[in-house]
Structure formats: C-alpha cells, structure tokens
Image: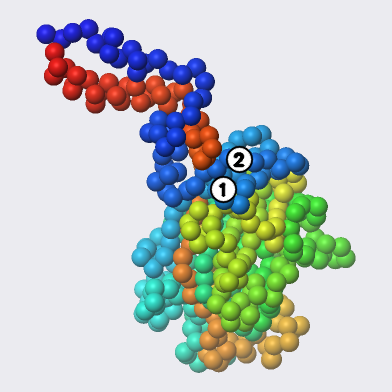
Amino acid sequence: MLHDLTPLLLPLLVLPTQATAYPNSLFAPLTERETRGSRLSIGKRQTNSNGSSSSSPSNNVTTTPNESDFLWIIQDTYDATNFFQEFSFFNGSDPTHYVDHDTAFAHNLSYISYDGKVVMKGDDTNWLAEGQYRESVRVSSNTIYNGGLFILDTDRAPWGCGVWPAFWTFGVEETWPGGGEIDIIEGVHDNEHNQVTWHTNPGCTLNPSANFTGSIVKGSPSPNLDCTGGPTQPGCGITEWSQASYGPTFDAQGGGVFAMKWDEDGIAVWSFYRVAIPQDIQDGTPNPANWPTPVAALAPTTCDPATYFSNHSIIFDITFCGDWAGNSYATSGCPGTCNDRLIDPSNFVNASWDINWLKVYRRQTVKGVVSSATGLHAEPRSFALLALAAAFFVVPGWLAMF
C-alpha cells in the first residue's frame, strides 16, 4: 500500500528564495555543468571603470557593460579529420582556374599531409601557354554562421608575385555585398602586412576612434571610412602594423593564429605569430577580453553587425592576378606582367595554405558564476528541475521501505 509521499517530497520542493552557494554542487544550472565539462574555468567577473567588457587573467568569463556574463563555447572544429568533408569546392575562372573536388585531389592541389596538415595550393608543376589560366583552389564551409569567434591556426599562408590569397567570410543568401563580407587574411604579391577589410551595403562606416592598432587604408585623399562594397567601391580596410602578419616573414617563423570575433559588440580581428599565441587559445578556452588590442575593429556605433552582416560561409582561396593582384602588379616591384608571371610554375611554390585547424566558438551567456571564494550562484528554477528529477530517481527506493 502506497503511503502519502508529501512529507517526503516537501523538503525537495521548498526552494531558496535567493541565490545560494553550493560549492562543487550538481545544483549548477545546465550551462555551468556544460562549462565544467568543456574545461572552461569560471571566475569572479570584473567590469572596467569605463564600462567595457572585461575579464581577469585567469578568467574565461567576459562581463559586458550591462552586467551580463558570457563565455565562448566550441561549436565547430575543422581539421585533418573532417575539413574536406565540411567544405565544398567552387570552380570557375577569373583568371584563376578554380577546380572541383576530384580535380583538386587528382592534381595534388588539396590533400592531408603526412603530419596532419590541411593543404590547399595552386598549381606549381605545369607550364602554361600564354593566356592560359593556372589551376587553384577555392572552398566554402557548408555551415552558415551569424556570428561567433573564428580562430585559424596555420603554418603557411600563400604569397608571391601575382598571388592574391584570402581567408574570409561573406553572406551567401543575398547578392553581394548584401549580407556583408569580412576579409580576415588578405594580401597580394610579396607584401608583409595583412589587410583586414569589410564590404557592406551603404550605411556602414569605420570609426577611426575605435580601439585597434592597425592603420586605416587610405582613400583619395583621406582615409577611407566608407565600407560600401561595389565595382568601384573597395569597402573599408585596416592594414596590420606587423611584418609577420603576411607573406614570407609569416611563413618563415612558422605561421601563427588569426582570430575574428563577430558579435553584438562589433567585429574585431587579431593575429598572433607562432611564439606569441595566447595560452587560452592553446588550451581551447579562448577569451578575447584577455588578449591585446585587436589589429582591426569595426565598432557597432557606426556599423551595426546585425544589420550589415548575416548568413556567412567561411572561404579559403588562392587567386592568381585578378582585380587586386592584377591591377596592382605594375607598381608592385614584381617582374614583367601578371599574365606573363602565370606561365612558369616555379613562381608559385609559395602559394599554399598549410592549416592545422580552424575552430568556431559560439557566445554563451552564463546564468551562474563559479569561483573558489563564493562557489555557485544559481537561479531558483534550477532547484525546481532538480527536485523533479529527485522524485523520479529517489522515490522508488523509498517505496521499498513501506
């Protein structure tokens, strides 16, 4: 005969009227348990005196000016195990002959190296007739993103006279530049400085007072702050100060990491050469609030990310000549003409991506905070859920006693 269980369940259903500390307790909200499972340490939040987002050096939680806490949770990882299954090949001519998947692998333009690198390269084997296009690779992610923290670790990025590589994202569901474009790595020829560029519909502008270390790309005659993209409108760009951010110096010192953060606080880009990669990136627990000033930033005050950027695919490509490398070739210091340059395959031995991994993190709001001093502060509804769970798992054992 079943007894009245109300006296037994009542203690479980009497919930705290305010947040209570339970160190190392299972009473944590789900987001906290996910956090611990992902090796993300959470500490006491900190707000800067100017109201900006901040974090202490040992803390992976960021606090925004409105006192909400968030961290970055891994969403997608692309590496030797899955890269070519998660990216699709684009094929066309411009005057680069982008090849399809089967041709890329058959001609040794895409492969996984013996040491686990994702390799994508231009043809550096075949001599061409004058006017013939050189084969290369362009791939796009199958997954579409509307924000995130995108971190690329690459040992090599393409460079050389007549070479125009890019690692970028753009909106695939609208006619360009609708949906926006974010060029994270881009350069031409033997340049030594990476250029970060945005292309948008009219209305988005670059704020020169935003916090970044690079130099705004000059227009005619003043710096170009208009991010509008079009046939005669180049968008707005920022050139990195570091000579190790692109080209031969970047490759010679072992490559490095590029990161792009796209959220409600704007769009920012960082680059780190190999020996200066932040520990939190190496540990898989990135927090841009702990990093140095970004090399480039597009502030939300003059360009709302939600308005101008949407539904982006991630792109890697290696273009030969084209609008930028072709039009700038005569003033680049490179020999001959760009079309002549295409003929000899030895000119393109450095036109290669050698990628370790690409990771995309999503921004996750934290509903409670764990620290060594205060333990866990949880919302009351978390206790209600646990009480119901306890009723299912514990009560059958109690019934056996009656």
Quadrant placement of the N terminus: top left
Name the residue: 27% across, 13% down. Answer: 8
Secondary structure of residue under mark 2: loop
Residue 208's place in the image compared with 163, above or below, is above
**1 sits to left or right of 311:** left
Around disc 2, counting alpha carbons within 10 Å, would you say few (fewer than 14), some (14 to 19), or many (20 or more)? many
Image-based side of 144 in relation to 230, left or right: left
The residue pinned by badge 1 equals 59
The location of residue 353, given as percent across then percent down, is 51, 74
Asked whether the viewer can see residue 171, the reply is: no
Q: Residues within 10 Å of mark 1 (few under 14, many from 20)?
A: many
Residue at 81%, 66% (x, y): give it.
218
164 left or right of 106 in image: right
Q: Residue flagged by tag 2: what amino acid is it? A: Arg
Which is more toward the observer, 300 or 189? 300
**Horizontal and vertical percent position of residue 286:** 54, 54
User: 40 and 249: which one is in front?
Assistant: 40
Residues tagged 1 and 2 counted as in contact (Cβ below 8 A) = yes
Q: Farthest front residue? A: 373
On the image, the x and y values in percent for residue 64 come to 65, 40
Query: How far apart, in angstroms, are the residues tagged by discs 1 and 2?
Result: 8 Å
Looking at the rendering, which quadrant does residue 241 occupy? bottom right
Q: What amino acid is at disc 1? A: Asn
Rendered image quadrant of residue 150: bottom right
Look at the image and tell me whether residue 260 can be seen: yes
When the figure is inspected, residue 230 is found, relative to residue 158, above or below; the finding is: above
Residue pointed to by mark 2:
45
| Label 1 vs 2, first from the N-terminus | 2
